[in-house]
Amino acid sequence: MAILVTGGAGYIGSHTCIELLNSGYEIIVVDNFSNSKPEALKRVSELTKKSFKSYNVDLLDQVTLEKVFFENHIESVIHFAGLKAVGESVETPLRYYHNNITGTVVLCELMQKYNVKKLVFSSSATVYGTPKYVPITEDFSLQSINPYGRTKLMIEEILRDLHLSDDNWSIALLRYFNPIGAHESGRIGEDPNGIPNNLMPYITQVAIGKRENLNIFGKDYNTHDGTGVRDYVHVVDLAKGHLKALEKIINSTGIDAFNLGTGIGYSVLDVVKIYENVTSRKIPYNFTHRRSGDIDKCYADPTKANKELGWKASKNLEDMCRDSWRWQKNNPEGYNEEIKEKI
Ligand code: NAD
Ligand code: UD1
């Protein structure tokens, strides 16, 4: 019996594959490598000293995806595959709706056909839109302000309808806050294409000299120092949350949402300061205008995940900064460098 991991070559997926393999699960990865490299999977295998099957398949390709279900004995699915850049989703909404929503529908149709009804889905704190206050609990009202966020919200609703239609389904909706950090080996990490949209990969590229300085988006937010406050969570803690969710869905039926965050909010300036302390690198910065769609504060109340999944983040912001830097320093070109060397 295996766990199918869609998007398993991506940032969160690759870290989760390591945790799954280290815990003795058999895994099968499906990824179209639209935002990742096969090298990440090689390194997962190298780090765990375990082999596993991986398929270069697009979720939209139902015929080929069906072969994966036909050839393997799949017990549950962890579904990471999706496009995730907010700005890009505003420019190309149809691509986002098609990839994320149709991809999920195709996957669920095959799951239903092959009687695989256990699913862990990558949702996001983005489904809370602009929260009325913080910390955010799972029962807050949901809204979204961009196509990416709407795909997450719509998929959550589709999965609720699916469960309503057949209560044999068991589904965990994991609402991630801000995953950062990297595997402590320094071999697996986040490898963004082009100019990073998110704070931590941008900071690490400034630290290594790829970018001159960090632009801090706004200094007049309603926060302790005027810069945006977020709940940064170590990607390895997040990966472990998937194993806890998996244990829950394997042993029960139902559908439920869980916040995966630390419950602590840090501002952009807090992150810069801690990053500088931990790495002894200087991060020059400028203040620029606010980024459209940004909110002042967003952090989780993670009590439900703690009580019902037995999950709690264990790594702090120092660990996250240290591990992000180790990954960046050891892999200045991300996964590309090793490929070049091998050619
Ligand atoms: P990622 O881009 O690194 O990983 C996603 C993977 O899915 C990639 O390997 C990509 O090639 C693959 N993929 C995309 N579309 C596919 C398709 N149609 N068929 C097959 N493979 C496909 O992203 P990530 O940061 O690892 O995020 C994983 C999931 O978590 C995504 O659904 C994302 O929306 C969600 N999420 C991420 C964050 C974050 O900050 N990283 C926050 C909240 C939610
Ligand atoms: C982004 C996404 C959100 C997603 C979340 C987690 C956008 C608009 N939102 O949100 O949908 O759920 O990531 O993946 O992309 N910052 C800077 N300079 C930078 C980059 C960021 O000052 O170069 C600031 C931001 O204004 C924010 C904080 O750093 O206050 C964190 O930004 P980011 O890492 O992009 O995460 P989110 O804004 O939470």
Image (cartoon, helix red, strand yellow):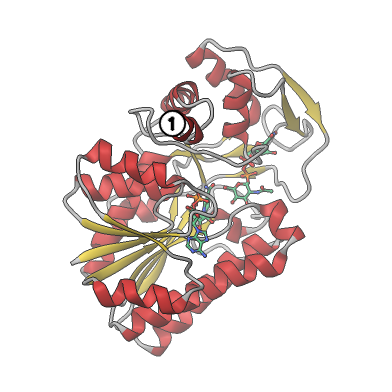
Sort mark 1 into few (<14), some (14-19) or many (20+) by Cα contacts within 10 Å. few
From this view, report whether residue 176 is shown above or below residue 247: above
Whole-percent x, y for residue 5 in the image = 35, 60
From this view, report whether residue 96 is shown above or below residue 259: below
Which type of secondary structure does the marked residue at label 1 adopt? Answer: helix
Q: Kindly identify the amino acid type of the residue bearing the numbered disc 1.
A: Glu
The reply to whether residue 270 is visible in this rendering is: no
Whole-percent x, y for residue 93 in the image = 71, 66
The reply to whether residue 29 is visible in this rendering is: yes
Residue drawn at 74 percent across, 29 percent down: 215
Q: Is residue 261 left or right of residue 219?
A: left
- Residue furthest to the top in view is 280
Residue tagged 1 = 338
Whole-percent x, y for residue 81 in the image = 47, 60
Q: Tell me the quarter of the picture where residue 171 sits.
A: bottom left
Quadrant assignment for the C terminus: top left
In the image shown, does 11 or 322 lie closer to the viewer? 11
Q: Is residue 61 left or right of residue 118?
A: right
Q: Which quarter of the rendered image does ligand 2 occupy?
A: top right
